[in-house]
Amino acid sequence: MAAPRHERARAAWLGALVIGATALAYLPALKAEFIWNDSDYVTAPQLRSFEGLARIWFELGATEQYYPLLHSAFWVEHRLWGDAALGYHLVNILLHATSACLLALILRRLLDHGIGPSTPRSAFASGPTAAGHERGRYTGVEWLAAAFFALHPVHVASVAWITEQKNTFSLVLYLAAFLVYLRFDETRWPRHYFWALALFGLSILGKTATATLPAALLVVFWWRRGRLTWRSEVRPLVPWLVLGAAAGIFTSWVEGHHLGGKGIGAEGAEFDLTWPGHVLLAGRAIWFYLGSLAWPFHLNFLYPRWPIDGTVWWQWLFPLAVVAVLVGLWALRRRERTPLAVFLLFAGTLFPVLGFVNLYGALYSRVWDHWQYLADLAPLALAGVALARAGVWAGPRLRRAGPALAVALCVLLGVLTWRRCGEFHDNETLYRSTLARNPDSWMAHNNLGEILARTSEGLPEALKHYAAAVRLNPGLAELHDNLGNALARTGRLNEAVDEYEVALRLAPDFLLAHNNLGNSLARMGGRLPEAISQLKEALRLDPTAPDVHNNLGIALLMAGRTREAIAHFEAALRLNPNLPQAHLNLAAALESVGRTDEAAAHYEAARRLGFDVPQPRDQPNE
């Protein structure tokens, strides 16, 4: 039966209020730039054609992760607003607000259809409906829960970070599938079933974390009815469970071996945990994520990467506490099933990110705010209902204060979200705010160093951050290479060479380290043969690298091997005709052997590419 007209109108106003409050809280995000790995998700130049769209679907490794529907959405967005960050932020905020509204619609349906007499039927009403003894349309508490979800600052990492459109995009499809399946559960009409299944499949193509939906539906049906039957509840969801398991296994393989076609993955010493270690990590992560919901005042982009050690007795307290809570809630299930159902939904939805499956992001932090985005639905829904129930149980005076308390909580969450959005404005702001709370984040030190090293003024501070990154993670070759580059720019060539050599001991096939070591050795008197050897090794690793050809040409030219140098400059230009340094160096080499007409042509090419080239040139550009 349709809801009364006045209740529909009230729900519409409350929904509009939630959307407006979400837009207001996230207003600072509209001014934000692209950050960290956004360039890996916003459609790359080679994928912006219709052929590129086909590659997104049919070529594993064409995109950072195999989420083809998500990357198709990015493909469309790039055609609409190109490289302007504003459009992507608008879409993320809209998707987030849409998910909040879908959550409210799901809660209304659940709370209106036989969930037991102990649940209140209206947020702050009076009389028998408020006591929860009559059925009726919900027009308050579901929107309060939606507001909690929409405004909670822990979700800023999913909404203000363009990369995490995979969260906001997939959640809309997840909740739509949830809502349609609830309709199927009531009607048993096949069209509802297949629409729900289609939406579920699409959500997985947006992000595989949504594969937990069928398990969540089973928990919800148990919560509503106190039991599960094979025919009514379990059997219809078997295909969903199979689909979700297959998607999860595939994504786990991609994360472990083939991330973005880069030949890297979540494997190696940083990811090697024993099974007790996985249990310790999972137990601690569950309480961490619950703590972030309950006390969202110390959120961070990167949290300290906990050491996992089974010989440290107190680390076992976390998983033991999870077991104790589950046992206690199970014992209480006959009196009240809601707390157990919520805990199962929360922990079960978190399962893919609890450490049992290796995820590449765990290299930097074992927990991330955006990993709990989907799991937060259940506890925040409970928070809305619990606040309403507290208003029902309280006396008349406290009951009237209920709406004021709800508004105050929403305002507090909105203010925290507004402030948190500012930390995602740009990379430098993000990494500085991260280090203020987590000074041991090697990744933040390294990335901030890369930003500062772009200018000569920022280079001294960049050196400090690179050195801190190496101190915190001495086993990562890339960090030594970055520190070496900064040292070389300041003229500290001996120290730079030491760092490059450490990088190559850690990663003997590290092309950039070979290249950079060769360049530094070439600048040091008497070490040209070593420089040439290193650059040839870099070229062996990648014969198609134009910069390496150019650098090897410079070293050969300095060694008096002009004809060999010319051959490498020409190879560099065949690979990249728009490399101005190669044009300049080739011109100088040609000029030195009397081929002045050809040299002039290359000087002119360098000018066309934006270089102010004086003539005549007597020395090659290094």
Image (spheres, rainbow, N blue to C red):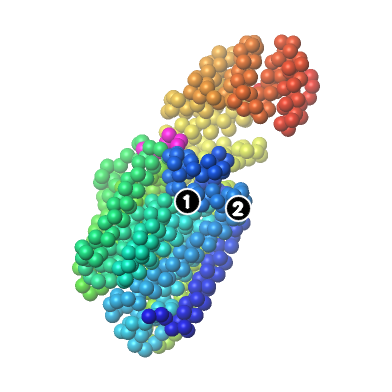
Image point 51% across, 52% down: which residue? Answer: 73
Q: Judge whether residue 265 is colored magenta.
A: yes
Please determine whether, in this image, residue 158 is positioned above or below residue 512: below
Q: Please indicate whether residue 199 sits to the left or right of residue 517 in the image.
A: left
Q: Judge whether residue 416 is colored magenta.
A: no
Q: Please indicate whether residue 53 sits to the left or right of residue 237 in the image.
A: right
Q: Residues within 10 Å of mark 2 (few under 14, many from 20)?
A: few
Q: Quadrant of the N terminus?
A: bottom left
Residue at the spot of label 1? 70
Q: Quadrant of the C terminus?
A: top right
Image coords of residue 451 (percent x, y): 59, 41
Q: Identify the main secondary structure in magenta.
A: loop
Which residues are drawn in magenta?
261-267
Image coords of residue 106 (percent x, y): 39, 69
Is residue 29 in sight in this rendering? no
Please report contact status of discs 2 and 1: CB closer than 8 Å, yes or no.
no
Image point 57% across, 23% down: which residue? Answer: 548
Label 2: which secondary element: helix
Q: Earlier in the sequence, mark 2 or mark 1?
A: 1
Foreground of the two, 436 or 537: 537
Q: Please indicate whether residue 143 sits to the left or right of residue 307 in the image.
A: right
Foreground of the two, 287 or 538: 538
Residue at the spot of label 2? 80
Question: Which image quadrant is residue 614 in?
Answer: top right
Q: Residue furthest front?
A: 190
Image coords of residue 236 (percent x, y): 27, 61
Amino acid at the residue labelled 2: Leu
